[in-house]
Amino acid sequence: MSGGDYLAAAYTVVLVTILLYVVIIAAKLTRLERQTAELAELARRRTDG
Amino acid sequence: MSTSSSNSRVPAIAAVAAGLVGLSLVLIFFVAPEDADQGISQKIFYFHVPIALTAYACFGWGALKALLYLWRREERYDLESYVGIHQGTIFGALTLVTGSIWARASWGVWWAWDSNQLVLFLVLFLFYSAYFMLRFSVEEGPRRANFCAVYALFGVALIPVSFLAIRLAEDFIHPTVFTRDGPQMSGTMFFTFCVAWAGMTALAYALYRVELVGKRLDANLRDLREALTT
């Protein structure tokens, strides 16, 4: 492997880690959005009932 | 300052981080000269060292928040300490991986056990990795927060040892770029390094704030669910 290959590997590792972090945060936000909708529905039913 | 008003600054922090990281990439690949000894692989330095310094800063931040928790007994400091250490562990893992790749390119080996700085950084990383084992093996509450805060404070003692190891042990394997005579590089290289360091610090802070927002939202939703279902 050349110096350029090692350089590309190092920067790819950093980029992939940050992207993976964004994916995890996005998944978490989706879960929180679903939970918020469930709680809003629960609150609505309590108010109606 | 209220939590919601400080949260509104998160997009601005993220934009600053994106701008600085983008600028640093332009400087690294189009402005900074190639190193005469190591060639193009030396450019790993511009991300590897700022990532390592950011990891130290995150661990230090986590310890500071732990100290504040023990002093003021406010629950939010426990969460902030945990998120700081989590960020430090991510940046610590990146330091080890990028450092290992650079070592292979420069020294021909993936790891050097006789380099004190490498081994001490690994010890620091493993110490803080074990923090999560402690945190998730104790039931949530003040007891867990106390254990975690004390553990985080113990770990911070390793930071100056790890940082100064290379100078104390006269380690000739790992390069010493910053000496008492100043940075051992050209002005352009140093400027590029500073921008990359600022970018990495801003990125870590943005990720810290985003994670903190998520964790607080999660806790608030749990409280709300409990209030609605009882």
Image (cartoon, grey):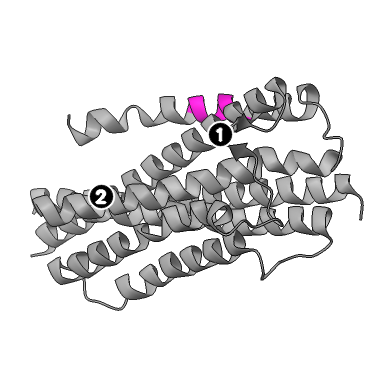
Protein chain holding label 1: B
Residue B35 lies, in percent from the top left, at: 82, 35
Secondary structure beneath dot 2 equals helix
Quarter that holds the N terminus of chain B = top left
* B141 vs A29, nearest the viewer: B141
Residue B19, magenta (yes or no): yes
Q: In the image, which disc is placed on residue B197?
A: 1
Q: Is B119 placed left or right of B29 in the picture?
A: left
* B56 vs B179, nearest the viewer: B179
Tell me which segment is drawn in magenta. B15-21
Asked if labels 1 and 2 share a chain, the reply is yes
Residue B3 lies, in percent from the top left, at: 21, 36
The three-letter code of the residue at mark 2 reads: Lys
Q: Tell me, yes or no, if residue B5 can be seen here.
A: yes
Q: In the image, which disc is placed on residue B218?
A: none
Disc 2: which residue: B65
How packed mark 2 is, by other alpha carbons closer than 10 Å (few <14, some 14-19, many 20 or more), is: many
* B134 vs B230, nearest the viewer: B134
Quarter that holds the C terminus of chain B = bottom left
Q: Is residue B31 above or below residue B41?
A: above
Q: Earlier in the sequence, mark 1 or mark 2?
A: 2
Q: Quadrant of residue B192?
A: top right
Residue B149 lies, in percent from the top left, at: 24, 62
Name of the residue lying farthest toward the bottom:
B137
**Distance from label 1 to label 2 (Cα)?**
23 Å
